[in-house]
Amino acid sequence: MRHVLKAVPEPQAILRAWMPFKKLLGVTSVRTEEDYAQARATIDTLLDEVGDNESHPLADVLDYLADQVKAYEDEKVQIPEAKPSEVLRFLMEQHGLKQEDLGDCAPQSRISDILSGKRSISKEIAKQLAHRFHVRADVFL
């Protein structure tokens, strides 16, 4: 099967589009802690707007930044082995979240049961949490 490529824009045209985008976004590559914090804050804002709508016009920007954050975390952030409930507690603390802030992932009572060790994390909730925190679902299983 042969693929037909679109015309490739001239580098100067790319630059004219890129520089205002980069200035508006504040970060386009994650190399420092400051870049990381800015990218995470922008991702949180985009997640509020885009949600699970993969056809949203900003979904590609969200994916791009998430890939930048993941590459930085893979290189710089060491995550020790921990129980899924401990991982959840850690991520909640890092993001300044309370149980009720995770209502998009599970009811507050279920989050409470998970954190207290009374309940394990189901595959469905693990997927929701993974999406919310931009991590692999298996860290919750």
Image (spheres, rainbow, N blue to C red):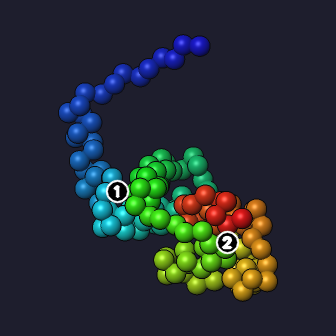
The foreground one among 127 and 48 is 127
Q: Which numbered disc covers residue 84?
A: 2
Number of residue marks: 2
Location of the C terminus (image quadrant): bottom right
The residue drawn where x is 23% and y is 39% is 15
Residue 30: which numbered mark, if any?
1
Report helix, strand or loop for mark 1.
Answer: loop
- Can residue 58 be seen here? The reply is no
Name which quarter of the figure residue 50 lies in: bottom right
Q: Residue at x 67, y 59 (%)?
A: 138
Circle 2/circle 1 CB separation < 8 Å: no
Q: Is 26 situated above or below 118?
A: above
Q: Position of residue 131 (x, y in %)?
A: 60, 60
Front residue of 25/84: it is 84
In the image, is 29 to the left or to the right of 15?
right
Instruction: Name the residue at 41% across, 56% down.
Output: 75
Asked if residue 70 lies left or right of residue 55, the reply is left
Residue 74's spot in the image, x, y percent?
A: 46, 56
69, above or below 6, in the image: below
Badge 2 amino acid: Pro
Displayed quadrant of residue 12: top left
Q: Amino acid at mark 1?
A: Val
Between discs 2 and 1, the one toward the N terminus: 1
* Residue at position x 25%, y 56% in the image: 23
Give the residue furthest to the front. Answer: 81
Looking at the rendered structure, which numbered label has been put on residue 88? none
Q: Quadrant of the N terminus?
A: top right
> Outermost residue, top direction?
2
Marks 2 and 1: which is nearer the front?
2
Q: Give percent across and percent down for residue 6.
A: 41, 22
